[in-house]
Image (tube, rainbow, N blue to C red):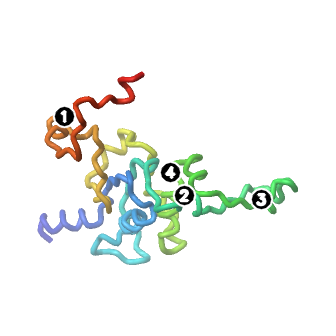
């Protein structure tokens, strides 16, 4: 085997670290991309019983986007661990159904984590694959993880630019919808 072929073989079997920005992304669509890399389905050596997946570092999970009123209507099951709860709380046997917005307020990484967990196949390899998933609520990642990252996964939807992202020259060149009259007085000038 030549040296070049040996390096190709090493790179095929090596675990790569990927970065994924979840800002303004649907967590359930993102989970499909993330779990493909966690399981190693993006590699030519993939086999369901082969543990060849990569590491994925997810940033900005606090800024995920759900469609429409899904924040209110999507619920997650949680068990308190206690056999029975208080009679007047409406909870029986410690089982709770938590809306997505409330779960996201408690832990901003949990919705994306649960989406990836449910999207993974097989019960035997699931714990190993989930151990290679690193989710952070903001874009602050520990330095030891950043040193390992070698590629970036492309998000499904582009993140729109805000007004602060444009320079003053670009804002001036933008076409105006209408011109204010000369004698126009704004509310801030009155006060």
Determine whether the residue tagged by mark 2 lies in a helix, strand or loop: helix
Disc 1 residue crowd, few under 14, some 14–19, many 20+, Cα 10 Å: few
Image depth: mark 2 or mark 1 in front: 1
Tell me the tag on residue 114.
none
Query: Label 3 vs label 2: CA separation?
Result: 23 Å
Which numbered circle lies on residue 71?
A: 2
Specify the label residue 168 is tagged with. Answer: 1
Nearest the viewer among 29 and 178 is 178
Cα distance in 3D space between marks 2 and 4:
15 Å
Name, please, the residue furthest toward the front: 183
The numbered mark, 1 or 4, whose residue comes first in the sequence reads 4
Q: Which callout, 1 or 3, points at the residue further toward the start of the chain?
A: 3
Q: CA distance from mark 2 to mark 1?
A: 36 Å
Indicate the position of residue 52 as horizontal and vertical percent values: 37, 67
Q: Which mark is residue 94?
A: 3
Which is more N-terminal, label 4 or label 2?
2
Q: Which mark is residue 109?
A: 4
Q: What is the crowding at mark 4: few (fewer than 14 residues within 10 Å), some, or many (at least 20)?
A: many
What residue is shown at x 59% (from left), y 52% (from top)? Answer: 103
In what quadrant of the picture does the C terminus appear?
A: top left
Find the distance from the CA under tag 1 to the CA under tag 4: 36 Å
Q: Is residue 153 visible?
A: no
> Depth-wise, is mark 1 or mark 3 nearer the camera?
1
Q: CA distance from mark 4 to mark 3?
A: 23 Å
Q: Is residue 190 above or below residue 46?
A: above
Asked whether the residues under the numbered discs 3 and 2 touch, taking CB atoms below 8 Å apart as contact, a structural biologist would say no
Residue at image position (37%, 77%) is 47
At 43% from the left edge and 64% from the top edge, which residue is drawn? 31
Q: How many marks?
A: 4
Secondary structure beneath disc 3?
Answer: loop
């Amino acid at each position: 085997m030549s040296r070049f072929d040996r390096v190709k073989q090493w790179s095929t079997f090596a675990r790569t670290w990927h970065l994924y920005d979840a800002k303004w992304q649907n967590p359930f669509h993102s989970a499909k991309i993330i779990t493909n890399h966690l399981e190693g389905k993006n590699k030519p050596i993939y086999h369901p019983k082969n543990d060849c997946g990569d590491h994925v570092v997810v940033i900005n999970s606090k800024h995920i986007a759900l469609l429409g009123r899904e924040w209110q209507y999507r619920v997650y099951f949680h068990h308190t661990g206690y056999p029975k709860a208080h009679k007047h709380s409406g909870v029986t046997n410690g089982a709770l159904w938590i809306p997505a917005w409330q779960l996201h307020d408690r832990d901003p990484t949990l919705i994306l984590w649960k989406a990836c967990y449910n999207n993974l196949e097989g019960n035997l390899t699931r714990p190993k694959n989930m151990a290679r998933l690193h989710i952070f609520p903001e874009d602050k990642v520990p330095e030891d993880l950043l040193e390992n990252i070698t590629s970036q996964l492309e998000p499904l939807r582009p993140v729109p630019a805000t007004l602060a992202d444009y320079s003053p020259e670009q804002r001036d060149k933008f076409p105006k919808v209408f011109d204010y009259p000369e004698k126009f007085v704004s509310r801030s000038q009155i006060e």
